[in-house]
Image (cartoon, grey):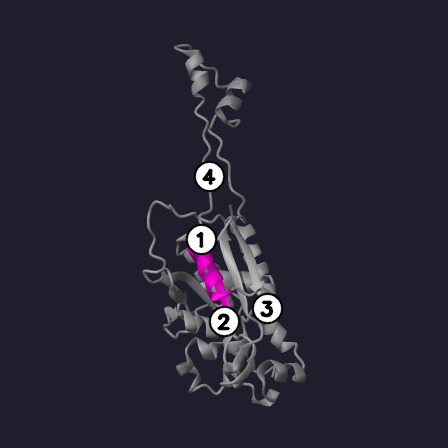
Amino acid sequence: MDEGFDDGYGMDGGLDGGFDSGLDAELDAGSDLLDEAGDESIDFSDPAVADELMLDDTGQTEISEMPEDEEVYDVPDTDEATDVEPILDQGANDFGYNGTCGPTSAANTLNDLLGSNEFSENDILEEAINSELCTTTEQLESMSQVEVEQVFGKDATDVTTEDIQGALGGTTTDQMLELYDNLNDKYDLGISTEVHEFDDALSIEQMADKLDEGDTVQVAVDFAQLDPSLAENADNGLMNPTGEVYTDHWITVTGTERDETGAITGFDVVDSSGTGIEHLSAEQLEAASLGSEGREVLDPTAIVVSKAA
């Protein structure tokens, strides 16, 4: 199991950028002082004058520096429309992690909510790795043979590199919530989150209401029911067509479609798994997130992300 873990899973990745940092010039022109002085000369060596005009010991205007380790999110101008570009193919990161539907969906969710393209999969994944809020190489390396078989559903000797890459970056609901909190604090995003799961899971109508209010929703789904045609060629045990299942994938739901009577006809979604799915009917989303006849979803979960009031 340990053999080959170190190949391709380097931790040298960095943020892709998109956040403004550096000097924030703060110049007090001292107009009141100048008005009072009129034609009289001003003694810039006078400590009171220097303080009023924010001059340093050399008579130069002081520039306040932003701490080097502080990153600032560049809030988009809401008066200018931004074409948000969805991230449709997870795995494009510096770490060799492919099971990153959670962090990638978080990037899609934040970009949609904030009307920007500021966040990449790599940005969110790096924060998740550094905060130990996803499955990491180190965690898999430390697993016992029994734990490996539980995670992958097969004998440890049969686990492939592809299996390993597919597990890396995986996130639980609690990890996602903490990750959003970390990002909110780090970039001062001004967002709030609320989770609806199990008996408190959102109905399709409730989810549509949240979207209509301007929120964006990250939803856990049963991948086999996201698009039934995808399950036909799957060799994954999770694709069992009947029975009770747990969700195994995250997507972002960005909007609601209604007919002229106001009835819900479908939802705009972003799926980062490469399926190309951008729209689901109300029935499809309900089946994928809540289950359908003969295939019950045991852990329905939705994270509603909102702009804080």
The residue shown at (46%, 33%) is 26
Instruction: Give the mark nearest the N terminus, 4 or 2.
Output: 4
The quarter of the picture where the N terminus appears is bottom right
Residue pointed to by mark 1 = 213
In whole angstroms, how far apart are the C-alphas of marks 3 and 4? 47 Å
Q: CA distance from mark 3 to mark 2?
A: 11 Å
How many numbered marks have been drawn onto this rendered protein structure?
4
Q: Residues within 10 Å of mark 3 (few under 14, many from 20)?
A: few
Contact? badges 4 and 2 (CB < 8 Å) = no
In the image, is residue 219 part of the stretch drawn in magenta? yes
The residue lying at 39 percent from left, 56 percent from top is 117
Badge 4: few (under 14), some or many (20 or more) residues near its Cα, within 10 Å? few
Question: Which residue is tagged 4?
Answer: 24
Badge 3 or badge 2: first in the primary sequence: 3
Residue type at mark 1: give it: Glu
Q: Which residue is mark 2?
A: 289
Q: Residue at x 51, y 69 (%)?
A: 220
Left or right position of 74 against 66: left
Residues in magenta, as a range: 203-221
